Image (cartoon, rainbow, N blue to C red):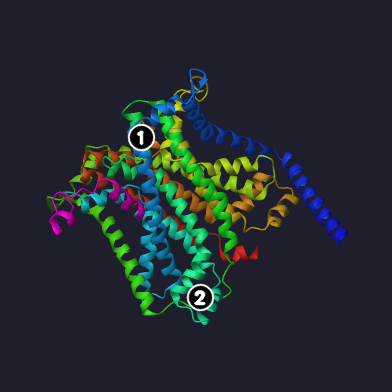
Amino acid sequence: MYKQGTFVSYKIYMASSQSKKLDRQKLFADPIMISTIVLLIVFLTLFILYPLAILLVDSFINEGNITLDVFKRVLAMAGFRKAITNTLKVGFLVGIASSLIGLLFAYVEEYVQLKTKLLSGLFKIISLLPVVSPPFVLSLSMIMLFGKAGIITRYLLHIYDNNVYGFWGIVTVQTLTFFPVCYMMLKGLLKNIDPSLEEAARDMGASRWKVFTTVTLPLILPGLGNAFLVTFIESIADFANPMIIGGSYDTLATSIYLQITGAYDKQGASAMAIVLLSITLLMFVVQKYYLEAKSTATLTGKASRQRMLITDKSVTRPLTFLCLIVALFVVLMYACVPLGALFTTWGYDFTLTLKWFQLVFTRYKGFKAFKDSFVLSLIASPITALLSMIISYLVVKRNFKTKGFIEAVSMLAMAVPGTVLGVGYIRGYSGGLFRTGILQGLYGTGLLLIIVFVVRSLPTGTRSGISALRQIDKSIEESAYDMGADSFKVFMSVTLPLIKDSFLSGLVTAFVRSITAISAIILLVTPKYLLITVQINEFAEKGSFGIACAFASLLILVTYSAVALMNLFIKYFGTSRTIKEEY
């Protein structure tokens, strides 16, 4: 038996080796594929690895010697040590709160029988609102509702000296911004749990709370930890919200920004960026290579039959009430933005006016800001979507030695905070190795901003593309190859049409992320380009909330229109289920 088993294992091993050898032979016989791989490696090295390497060089090398002097100087700053503590405190609390609220919304959607479809639709929309909105909208709303001239604090509660800035302001805004990420992650986990596991416990007399704590929660615990870490990374990397509502409560992201723009200390900023990057990378490695794998192994797969939704009023009423409170609060926050642009002076004169919208386009160069933001984002989004699909295709469908490098580096951008990337591009392309040569004039150009947009959105599109491609049988493409088609023809005429929905989704996601980006580009934008997000940030810092809200309202209109058009396009022109089933 042992010899027979060994022989079978040997045959499997040989067959696998032969298959890999044939794949490599096909690859080397395809010049288009080889060229694509080489160009991808060059792009990822130049625009992700190189800026990070320059930060390391700046931080550890001084006058040709390896030294820790820069780190010692930075860590000696009491303000920076405080910023590290502040960042970790905010990250942990936001991670916990976002995970719990996300779990609440996901559980209600998958397990609870809601009275009306209106409630279900409201919860879905509210949980997705912050995902497609500019990152600082809720900070503006928080100030207008709970600040010294806030509607709730000043006019309803008659509190005239309320300070909304600082720790609790950041935590509240970031929690409302990031809980949808947890909701989307946990919704899939809950949906995939076999209902028979929970029903067996109910049949044995366990209460619903007992079933949740002893069956449901243990199954999703790794996924819950995964959601916490993703939110933690997003929180500590966030720049926009702490900048607007943080006040004197500094975080690592704002400290790095101020070290460059205020102290003009690029080397010190590089060392600070390495500290922030080390924290996010550590969390990313734990999340990506430990918790994600554990989550997959823990779940039981797709449900064998439809789950019987909970109808007990003792469960449905309190859970629905909690979701409703959060939903109404989010609606109130988003309603403040257009209202703030329609009132003469927020907090003092509530006469309706359109003057702020007029000033956007007359005095504050709104046309240029929208044109620059729109054009740069429009150029970046198809490039990002196509690159994402190409990387996904290479990772899922091809075997070659540098495949792991391409996948790891393209995903690395997810763990790199925008401020860190911005500092890396400043150090790398305003000096570094490219004082002369083809990339000498890259810094300060629109091309560099487009590259930043592409790099920041690449991981999201790649993950979506990998998921879609894993559902396509390899034999479909192989039959096209057998008929004489080259890799470019197969990708464009067979693969891409089958993942059209993911491509369109990645395109619009890249557009929304690009046009609402702030953390990376605020350090790279020059007077030559006016971007909407930078304008909003500038006016919000000055306390000019009318102009800031007008810019933000128009930006929200643009992003929501893009998402609506994508959904409409996919509905009528997307890949049909019939085609997928045939394949």
The question of residue 379 being in magenta is answered with: no
Residue identified by numbered label 1 = 80
Tell me: residue 326, above or below residue 349.
Answer: below
Label located before the other in sequence (2 or 1): 1
- x and y percent of residue 4 in the render? 87, 60
Q: Secondary structure at mark 2?
A: loop
In this view, the residue in front, 352 or 345, is 345
Q: Is residue 67 visible?
A: yes
Q: Nearer the viewer, mark 2 or mark 1?
A: 1
Crowdedness of circle 1 by 10 Å Cα count: few (<14), some, many (20+)? some
50 to the left or right of 541:
right
In this view, the residue in front, 461 or 15, is 15
- Magenta part of the chain: 149-175
- x and y percent of residue 24 in the render? 74, 43
Give me the residue at 35% from left, 40% from top: 251
Residue identified by numbered label 2 = 307
Quarter of the image with the N terminus is bottom right
Q: Callout 1, which amino acid? A: Phe
In this view, the residue in front, 170 or 120, is 170
24 to the left or right of 390:
right
